[in-house]
Image (spheres, rainbow, N blue to C red):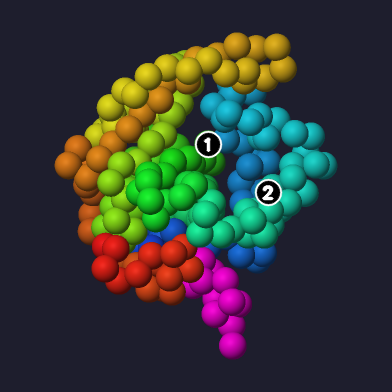
Amino acid sequence: MTLADQFPPFGLRIHCGDLELVPITDDVIPGLVELALDGIHAPDAMPFYVPWSTAPREELGRNMAQFYWQGRATFSPAAWSLHLAVRHTGELVGCQDVSTRDFAVTRTAETGSWLASKHQSRGIGTRMRQTILAFAFDELGATEMTSGAFTDNPASLAVSRKVGYRPNGVERRQRRPGELAQVQRLIVGPDDFRRGEPITVTGIEAFRLFIGLDQSDR
């Protein structure tokens, strides 16, 4: 018996050419912490809804580990977040997430990601997004996917446009304590989605059952 038998997300592997998305098991967390400590964005910028990346260095790793552990502990068909580490040509480069509630009914989920600074501006971020969207539409039967980015984050918004997202309203958020910022909400459906390379997935049948889908739901 393996951990994947008890927690099927651990059995998922998504490949797209030289890109691989794998579950964030405990042995992967230290590598992600090192990437985050090495830098994700400029010191004066904040691309995340929760400013987790600016935690003191001595706290960041603990915070990240607890975040991934909490995601596993609260995972259920009613509400789940799938956190995947991204490897490019075998090297760890960042993280790609997809989160949802009542997916079996809504067929809607939200994507989020981060990519270490030293791996940015190489097209990897676009391919990460194409890979997770292909997974959601083709393997899980999603009918729409959402995302969002602060309006002063042109790089993220450009990636979203490139893969087919369209504007879906603007919302106001507190970004850092006392700081108001606007989020451009985004949405994409399978007909708008601009695909990249084909993907291959292992471990999908057990994962589908785990989130409450059966074979006829594709």
Left or right of 81 in this view: 56: right
Question: Within the magenta stretch, is there residue 4?
Answer: yes
In the displayed structure image, the side of residue 36 where residue 107 appears, left or right: left
Q: Considering only vertical position in the picture, is 153 above or below 64?
A: above
Q: Secondary structure at mark 1?
A: helix
Q: Residue at x 34, y 24 (%)?
A: 168
Residue in the image at 74% along x and 45% along y: 63
Q: Residues within 10 Å of mark 1 (few under 14, many from 20)?
A: some
Image spot of residue 154 (x, y percent): 40, 21
Residue 178 counted in the magenta span: no
Residue on which the image places disc 2: 67
| Relative image position of residue 105 (x, y in whole percent) | 38, 51
Q: Is residue 84 visible?
A: yes
Q: Amino acid at mark 1?
A: Ser
Q: Disc 1 marks which residue?
A: 117
| Residue at disc 2, secondary structure | helix
Measure the alpha-carbon separation of dots 1 and 2. 21 Å
Regarding residue 202, the answer to whether it shows in the image is no
**Which amino acid type corresponds to the residue marked 2 in the rendered image?**
Phe
Considering every residue shown, the one lying at the far bottom of the view is: 1
Relative to 53, say whether 100 is above or below. below
Mark found first going from the N terminus, 1 or 2 = 2
| Position of residue 9 measured from the top left corner of the image (x, y, whole percent) | 51, 66
Choose between 30 and 105: the one closer to the eye.
105
Chief SS of the magenta region: helix
211 sits to left or right of 141: right
**Magenta span:** 1-11
Relative to the observer, which residue lies in front, 37 or 143? 143
Q: Which residue appears at 38% of the width and 36% of the height?
A: 146
Farthest residue in the right direction? 58
